[in-house]
Image (spheres, helix red, strand yellow):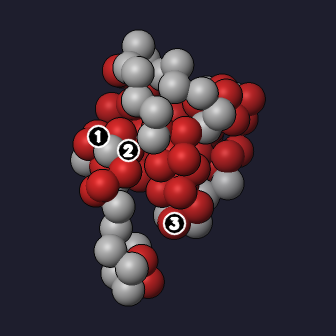
Amino acid sequence: RLPARELPNRLSEWRIARGLSQEALAEKMGSSKQTVHRHENSTDVSLKSLIRYAEILEVRVEELLIDSLRVPQGLTDLL
């Protein structure tokens, strides 16, 4: 498990930026909406899940973990 305080916010921000609902992301993950909801509200996410989220959201794992790697304002329209 990864102690990443930024993960819940970053995960939901990237999901929304990609135009995905929790349900749609869960389907791509092969999990339930409840699992995605739990991951978006806690830091208790396995490395395997974190890597899969990064693949689906087309971001680097670091972008899910570190707030300072936030997408610069103005570029969010390109996502």
CB atoms of marks 3 and 2 within 8 Å = no
* Residue at the spot 32% in from the left edge and 74% down from the top edge: 72
Q: Are marks 1 and 2 in contact (CB under 8 Å)?
A: yes
- Is residue 13 toward the left or the right of residue 67 in the image? right
Distance Cα–Cα, label 1 vs label 3: 16 Å
Q: Sort mark 2 into few (<14), some (14-19) or many (20+) by Cα contacts within 10 Å.
A: many
In the rendered image, the quadrant that contains the C terminus is bottom left
Q: What residue sits right under mark 2 in the picture?
A: 64
> Dot 1 surroundings within 10 Å: few (below 14), some, or many (20 or more)?
some
* Mark 3, other Cα within 10 Å: few <14 / some 14–19 / many ≥20: some
- Looking at the rendered image, the disc whose residue lies closer to the viewer, 3 or 2, is 2
Residue 59 sits above or below residue 70 on the image: above
**Image position, residue 52 (x, y; %):** 38, 34
Q: Earlier in the sequence, mark 3 or mark 2?
A: 3
Q: Amino acid at mark 2?
A: Leu
**Hey, which quadrant is residue 68 in on the image?**
bottom left
Q: Secondary structure at mark 1?
A: helix
The disc labelled 1 sits on which kind of residue? Val
Tell me: 68 left or right of 12.
Answer: left
Q: How many marks?
A: 3
**73 left or right of 34 in image:** left
The residue at 39%/79% (across/down) is: 73
Q: Is residue 17 above or below residue 48?
A: below
Identify the residue under disc 3: 17
Which residue type does callout 3 highlight? Answer: Ala
Question: What element does badge 3 sit on?
Answer: helix
Give the answer, above or below, for where 30 lies relative to 3.
below
Q: Which residue is mark 1?
A: 61
Mark 2 lies on a secondary structure that is helix
Is residue 15 at least partly visible in the picture?
yes
Separation (CA) of disc 1 from disc 2: 5 Å
